[in-house]
Image: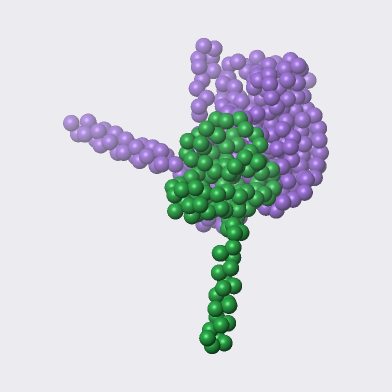
Chain colours: A purple, B green
């Protein structure tokens, strides 16, 4: 208990010292379409056939209008509850330790179906949460009828997900209710979904919902798994699965056995008691232009190195996946790579000359 | 006139009948994933076309015919329901609706949707009037 109190306080107080990201997990939709977010953070933890998906919705400070978010899910959640108070912050802290005061940390870093089936409805703080089962048309129409102003790319994005899994979570954020509750701008409401599935994946494409072509989508994705996960597409710096295409917008920052202190701190947070003694921590930083983010992150944590093509959003095969990612590589990335190569060559030549001079 | 020629003349007459009658040509325009299909059409000056508009998306779309300047005006306008206005239609999710329009002199026009963000997203097409 003492550690709980101490940790909650330390993270709350430390929030001013570390760069605080804006949390949310789906395509965020405001009164006039999607809302810009600085960065999103999610944890997808997988153990004993259960995916624990933790994310948070941040109160933007707006006092008018209803904001909402649509999150595609790999299966029907058995539980949707308020997440723990520090899980996401603790994970961020694990990979970005606090900096001394005074320093600024730059953190850039159709089928016309009937109405969808309502699987469950709950209210968590100022969020009205509905889990829906239905096709893209049914879910999209429901969202429009319930105050979500879908951006123009919503039909194709919903279709992309509905072909794989027809389960969606719609979260309506009532700004007026949040203000009435005394929530201040930047206050987040963590949500924890417990989803039995044998096929975990993290929705990434939804993050680009309503975003323009070259706008960069930033996200921090944490995975906690029993084994080292194989991922599709592969992040830069990841293990080389011979056949898996590489997504240059994803960078593998950490891949290590989770520290004992992290495991202990997470396990005592609300709803995290399911955690085993030891897990593998993977931290991926996503920084991809919206028009290149046509994929999700499929995970195989069984040790068999066979992440699902379908779960990554490529049902037509590995060649198509590779081609899609190759074709969507932005020109600036190619130029940056070419520039780095040229710079490297010039430096080497210069060093040799200096040595021989 | 032989019997064969008479039959041929009758068949030819029957084939030409729809073109000579006053019923307008129908062009089906699908709206899917916030894009039109087709995106380009050819019509004749003075021709009346019956557009069959099919909205397959779970969101409202518009079909508004006009010049580039008129489209720019619609882009900043606040009209919600365009039904009943000449060359304009608003379609609810999944709705199918018809719209008849008579084209004037030769030139080109644009058809577009002006729901927030749709025009910039590429929900537009061209009509060439010859
Ligand atoms: Cu439209």
User: In this orientation, does residue A296 appear?
Assistant: no
Q: Residue at x 76, y 42 (%)?
A: A132
Q: Residue at x 55, y 75 (%)?
A: B12
- Give the image quarter of residue A94: top right
Identify which residue, A207 or A95, lies in the foreground: A207
* Count of numbered tags: 0
User: In this orientation, does residue A127 appear?
Assistant: yes
* Above or below, comparing residue B91 to residue A9 in the picture: below
Furthest-front residue in this view: B1
Q: Residue at x 66, y 44 (%)?
A: B91
Q: Position of residue A55 (x, y in %)?
A: 68, 32
Furthest-left residue in this view: A357
Q: Position of residue B106 (x, y in %)?
A: 44, 49
Identify which residue, B82 or A349, lies in the foreground: B82
Furthest-bottom residue in this view: B2
Q: Position of residue A16 (x, y in %)?
A: 60, 15
- A226 sits left or right of B74 in the view: right
Q: Position of residue A49 (x, y in %)?
A: 74, 46
- A33 sits left or right of B41 in the view: right
Q: Residue at x 56, y 27 (%)?
A: A38
């Amino acid at each position: 208990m003492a550690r709980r109190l101490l940790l909650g306080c330390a993270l709350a107080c430390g929030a001013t010292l570390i760069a605080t990201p804006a949390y949310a997990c789906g395509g965020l939709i405001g009164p006039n379409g999607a809302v810009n977010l600085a960065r999103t953070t999610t944890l997808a933890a997988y153990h004993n056939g259960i995916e624990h998906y933790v994310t948070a919705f941040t109160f933007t400070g707006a006092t008018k209008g209803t904001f909402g978010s649509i999150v595609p899910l790999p299966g029907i959640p058995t539980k949707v509850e308020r997440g723990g108070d520090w899980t996401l912050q603790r994970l961020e802290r694990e990979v970005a330790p606090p900096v001394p005061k005074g320093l600024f940390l730059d953190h850039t870093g159709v089928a016309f179906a009937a109405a969808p089936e309502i699987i469950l409805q709950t209210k968590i703080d100022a969020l009205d949460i509905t889990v829906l089962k239905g096709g893209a048309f049914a879910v999209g129409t429901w969202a429009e009828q319930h105050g979500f102003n879908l951006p123009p790319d919503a039909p194709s994005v919903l279709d992309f997900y509905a072909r794989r899994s027809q389960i969606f979570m719609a979260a309506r954020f009532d700004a007026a209710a949040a203000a009435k509750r005394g929530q201040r701008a930047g206050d987040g409401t963590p949500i924890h979904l417990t989803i039995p599935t044998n096929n975990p994946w993290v929705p990434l494409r939804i993050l680009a919902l309503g975003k323009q072509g070259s706008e960069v989508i930033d996200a921090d994705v944490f995975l906690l798994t029993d084994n080292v996960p194989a991922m599709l597409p592969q992040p830069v710096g990841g293990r080389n699965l011979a056949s898996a295409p590489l997504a240059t917008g994803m960078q593998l920052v950490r891949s290590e056995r989770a520290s004992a202190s992290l495991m202990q701190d997470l396990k005592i947070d609300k709803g995290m008691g399911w955690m085993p003694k030891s897990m593998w921590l993977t931290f991926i930083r996503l920084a991809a232009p919206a028009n290149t983010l046509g994929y999700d992150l499929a995970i195989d944590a069984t040790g068999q190195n066979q992440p699902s093509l379908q779960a990554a959003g490529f049902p037509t095969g590995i060649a198509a996946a590779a081609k899609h990612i190759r074709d969507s590589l932005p020109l600036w990335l190619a130029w940056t790579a070419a520039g780095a190569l040229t710079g490297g060559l010039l430096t080497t030549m210069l060093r040799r000359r200096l040595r021989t001079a | 006139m032989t019997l064969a020629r008479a039959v041929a003349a009758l068949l030819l007459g029957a084939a030409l009948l729809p073109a000579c009658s006053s019923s307008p040509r129908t062009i089906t325009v699908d709206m899917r994933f916030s894009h039109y299909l087709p995106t380009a059409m050819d019509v004749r000056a003075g021709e009346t076309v019956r557009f069959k508009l099919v909205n397959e998306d779970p969101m409202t779309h518009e079909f508004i015919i006009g010049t580039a300047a008129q489209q720019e005006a619609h882009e900043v306008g606040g009209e919600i329901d365009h039904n009943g206005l000449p060359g304009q239609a608003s379609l609810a999710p999944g709705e199918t609706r018809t719209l008849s329009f008579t084209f004037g002199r030769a030139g080109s026009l644009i058809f577009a949707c002006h729901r927030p963000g749709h025009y910039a997203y590429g929900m537009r097409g061209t009509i060439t009037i010859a």
